[in-house]
Amino acid sequence: MPESVSVRCPACRREHVYTAPAYPCACGTPAAPRLDRVAAPVVAGHRSWADDWIGAACAVCGRLNHWPRPEVGCPCGTVLRIPVLETGPDPDPAPARTEPSPDTAPPRRAFQPHAVRTARDAVTATALYLRWLGYGDIRRADQRPVHGIGLAARGLLAQVDPTVRPAAPRDVECLWLTAMTESADCVYFSLAGYTDAARACADSLGVPLFVLDLTGVPQPVNDPADALNADGAPEPGRRARRG
């Protein structure tokens, strides 16, 4: 069960109750960060990508996941970071699952979305979705796109566009060209959707397009996206088929 902890804002002295959200591991197990009940919360100051994520091991499969760092926003404007225990699995983990044979492998569990209210939420929702698909080592991309935010995983480049401007053909082409130079597949996520020309361009290049709604659930809008949503990440060493 998710943990809860009482937090006092050092600026205005308001009391808050924080409940750790549960995120899905790639194995399908929902898990929540383990809260440190001894350490005091820290006021968030200068933000960086590395500070916004924590490492937490899945209690079932042992996989090291990277999840958004727990935070509480106080009405006075102060943002508090909740201390967590980041190393190792739960001290009393559930029994490990036995590995099923390929013919009897269970289906993936339902995706657990992250509501989108800010650009950062859009990135978080996308990262969780990519992890649910089976991609690992999700991080900020080395090359920043002209519009939006770039994410990278093993064998994949993803672009997250949280603006209110529908993506244009040039956006899709730039992502595809960058992915080609890195011998990676690519996928585009947009809050505002795509122009008709952008969709035609993506179809010709085999680029999956998703619309990210405010509930945080990516909706496929072309055939490559439907295939990715259904099949998940390709096996290691094999790129997804384009076109």
Image (spheres, grey):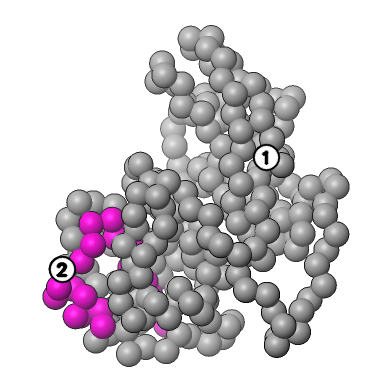
Query: What residue sits right under mark 2 in the picture?
Result: 195
Q: In which quarter of the image is the C terminus?
A: bottom left
Residue 42 drawn above or below residue 175: above
- Residue 152 appears in which quarter of the rendering? bottom left
Considering only vertical position in the picture, is 97 above or below 49?
Answer: below
Residue at the (58%, 83%) spot, across then down: 235
Residue drawn 24% across the image and 86% down it:
204
Judging by the rendered image, the residue that carries numbered circle 1 is 2
**Quadrant of the image containing the N terminus:** top right
Which range of residues does the magenta coloring cover?
182-203
Q: Which amino acid does label 2 sit on?
A: Thr
Residue 89 is left or right of residue 118, and the answer is: right
Q: Position of residue 212 (x, y in %)?
A: 34, 58
Q: Which residue is drawn at 60% across and 70% down?
A: 108
Seen from the viewer's position, the closer of residues 67 and 45 is: 67
Can residue 19 be seen in this snapshot?
yes
Does residue 12 lie above or below 171 as drawn? Answer: above
